[in-house]
Image: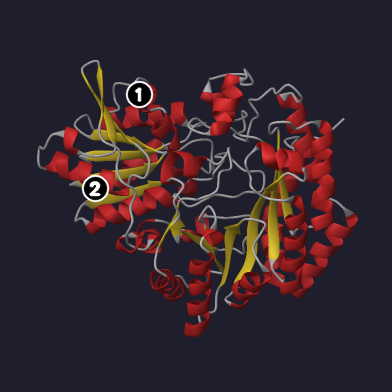
Amino acid sequence: MNILCVNPPFMGRFSRTSRSPAVTKGGTLYYPIWLAYAVGVLEQAGHEVRFFDAPADDLCLDDLFVRLDGFLPEMVVVDTSTPSIYNDIQVAEEIKEKFPSAFIVIVGTHPSSLPEETLDLSESIDAIAVGEYDYTIRDLASALGNNLPLENVDGIVFKKGDTFIKNKNRDKIIDLDDIPFVSSVYKRHLNHRNYFFAAANYPMMMIITGRGCPFKCFFCVYPQVFHGRRYRTRSAENVVDEFEYIVGNFPGIEEIGIEDDCFTANRGHAREICELLIKRGIKIKWYCNVRGDVDYDLLKLMKEAGCRLVTVGFESGSQHILDNIHKGEKVERYYQFAKETKRVGLLVHGCIMVGNPGDTRETVAESYEFSKKINCDSMQFYPLYVYPGTEAFNWASDNGYLRTMDFSHWLTNEGLHNCVLNTSQLSSEEMVTLCDYYLKKYHLRPGYLLSKLRQAIIHPSEGYRTYKSAKVFFSKILNGQIAGAN
């Protein structure tokens, strides 16, 4: 079957796969990871696939049609997100107009949470693939190609007349080793130089070593909507084989990003990967997402295996707030973790959220003081972004904190994150202003700037990475897109 998979055009370098999709202040653009994995599965099953990432290639829809060059899709898979949903539905409609006989299926966290509402947005949409969709799309293509009933395809929602048909939920994939390397899909279809993560060395690559997350953070969308709370992992051998594939097939790649929600959720698995990287002598830098509680011995082993940086969602420097969001962490342990990462020589990219249950100006100031003390290599400050399907969204909705249910307002006119919450303690304007204020205050400290200059002199690649991020950051300051606080 001929299948078109599309990360649709929308607001320039819109990072749709980011956990909070937007045009980012630091220039980050994620690979379309989940769509790429599905492409690999489709090709593995023998289908002919065209895969386009419009934001990365700066394509409009007409450009995409030209690149198809006579290829006639029988099924079209369109990725989406909450803030881009209306645009993406319009893109799907235009594709349907161009290819009337094509079966249009929408994927992503937003339609997974609101399948019926999404189907109701347009008659051009034929089905929604709910949750982890690699095998759902494969089986749907098989059903369509063999004229089999759609009712037999687990994981989809579709309409018959005015009736919604919600099929059986699809089981989560257990044997992740059976899925082709996502980097091999990148190699065939994408330009790896289009992608950027502000905390990583450029050019970089993003992979997944496991899906799901066992922790209970009330805001995190992928575990709640897509992959579940069970952390399912690839074998260490399979992961390290992909490291070798990347080193051998992408000359000039500076870093690999492990984009699991929490790479160290299974510490034994993390150790196996590190030990095998060391045993095989694979020399490439990598980063990963972890919680702020990893023990010294594992941090040391990760460093020895090539880990350069860990990304940590600290979320708050107030224990009361951490408890409110079910973080399951202690501020005291964060301080210990920060000392131990410095001791082993790992950089830390930290994240602080504003607007969590119980947050006030005072707790936000407390979080800033905490961030100064742990003094990470870089620190994000951003309002709580709530997405359908999460506890955070339900909390905001139940308490009347949502300013709008028009999902296009989840972004500003420039495509930046927009706060849609007015809590009992902080208005949306206050949250945005506080985040911008502390973002500037943290990164414009004289001591911090001197440390970055020293880092750039000692490690030129770190200097180039900082330059690319700072260029975007300061341009947004000059354009008034990062404001100060009163």
**Distance between the alpha carbons at the discs numbered 1 and 2:** 22 Å
Q: Secondary structure at mark 2?
A: helix
Name of the residue lying farthest toward the top? 162
Number of callouts: 2
Quick check: 198 left or right of 87?
right
Relative depth, front residue between 25 and 121? 121
Mark number for residue 138?
2
Quick check: 31 left or right of 184?
right
Q: Position of residue 168 (x, y in %)?
A: 26, 35
At horizontal 64% and vertical 61% (from top left) the residue drawn is: 310
At horizontal 15% and vertical 39% (from top left) the residue drawn is: 144
Q: Mark 1 packing: few (<14 Cα in 10 Å), some, or many (20+)?
A: some
Q: Position of residue 203 (x, y in %)?
A: 55, 63
Q: Secondary structure at mark 1?
A: helix
* 430 is higher (above) or lower (below) than 169: above
Q: Between disc 1 and disc 2, whose residue precedes?
A: 1
Amino acid found under the numbered disc labelled 2: Arg
Residue 60: quadrant of the picture: top left
